[in-house]
Image (tube, rainbow, N blue to C red):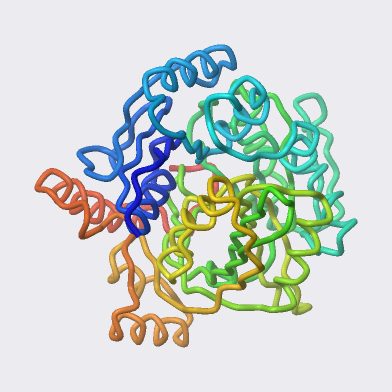
Amino acid sequence: MKRDDFLPVLLGSDINVYGMARSFHEEYRLCSVAIGKGILGVCQNSKIVHVEVVEPNIEDDEVFVKTLIAFAEKHNSKPLLLVPCGDNYIKLLVRNQDKLRALYRFECIDEALLMRLSIKESFYEVCEAHGFSFPKTAACTAENYREVKLDFDFPVIIKPSNSVAYWNASFPHKKKVFIAESKAELDSILEAIYSSSYQDHLILQEYIPGDDSNMRVMNCFCGKDKKVKLIALGNALLEEHSPEGIGSYAAIINGYDEELSEMMKSFLEGIGYVGFANFDMKYDNRDGTYKLFEMNLRQGRSSFFVTAAGYNLAKWLVEDVLDDADASLTIAHERVLWSIIPKRIIFKYVRDEKLKAEARELIKTGKYVQSYYYSGDRNLKRWVAYVRNQLNYFDKYKKYFGNKSLKG
């Protein structure tokens, strides 16, 4: 259904932004604009999204508000639908929402709920109160990391509590997530992290057995009436394995779990959530439960797998925020193979033969979607960039597959 009665304004310029822009284009034939700290390759030379404003200091609250006000004043001929696509942007929007509501259309949670959910220690307290399982967890600080004691065995996962601050830190062999196989390795990783600008808490967790295919991702949308409208589960085939990409999904087949969906509905409505939410979890074969890792207060960078299966994320957002539609809950069940990596990598590195067989069948029946490659956004420059992007993955997996330690 073609529409031109609003303008999608996306915050960021990564694959998540491109996925949302593609969702708007597929559903409404609309082109989006983006505002961000920089411009990444996936959004360059695009016909469906234009990064109109690049502001390196946009993570400063005053600059953020000033930038968005200036943009709105230049584009005031139609409603502006504001869509944050990164942790930093959702936090900026929540903190400054009252200053922007007169200029943009959006819904988001309040700052008190954001703080409860975005800091991992308090998030696990909320999870426990709503019956979710999660890995055995400890935390350390810059003051006590040398004396930290664990009540679970190695391997141990190390990740930041404050992902935005960690993203801005730099140190040798930095990775998005680390796995320490021993106490000596744990000590070295903690020393390296706290020798950088990152001085916030670190989360230390037990390692849940199983490879990437045990990972699950759940995307949800909650309307402004604080009722869940959409739930979509994904079964990961592979994650990315480059230092900056560890933990990000590279290939997914949609899944379905009614009991888990009902639990998530109860959780989100119980806390009064509004907007997109994205959950990372891992299936634990030892006890048959899902162990919840974290909640992103936005759609995830892999969330286009939901649109690809026929549940267009832009449609749910527009109908709620702009059209005031009263939608009931949809639990996604259609299946598709979504990917950002070449098919050859999927079949080389995925170990589960049943999943590989399903992936081959989905490809054979035309139910395969590559996020970066879109027939509605073709030109020579994008094709060259796409080919380079795909070829780079062969080198990345060869060099980094399985490497989550403090080495290159």
In this rendered view, identify the residue nearer to me: 99 or 266: 99
Look at the image and tell me whether residue 192 can be seen.
no
Look at the image and tell me whether residue 225 can be seen.
yes
Who's the residue at 20% across and 39% down the image?
45
In the rendered view, would you say 238 is above or below 179? below
What is the total number of numbered labels drawn onto the structure image? 0
Percent coordinates x, y for residue 156 in the rendering: 70, 53
Which quarter of the rendered picture does the N terminus lie within?
Answer: bottom left
In this rendered view, identify the residue nearer to me: 238 or 316: 316
In this rendered view, identify the residue nearer to me: 310 or 164: 310
Farthest-out residue, left: 380
Which quarter of the rendered picture does the C terminus lie within?
Answer: top left
Query: Left or right: where does residue 41 sit relative to residue 285?
Result: left
Percent coordinates x, y for residue 117 in the rendering: 75, 43
Percent coordinates x, y for residue 32 in the rendering: 35, 40
Q: In the rendered image, which quarter is residue 211 located in?
A: bottom right
In the rendered view, would you say 263 is above or below 200? below
In the rendered view, would you say 357 is above or below 235? below
Who's the residue at 82% across and 42% down the image?
122
Query: Left or right: where does residue 1 sit relative to residue 183?
Result: left
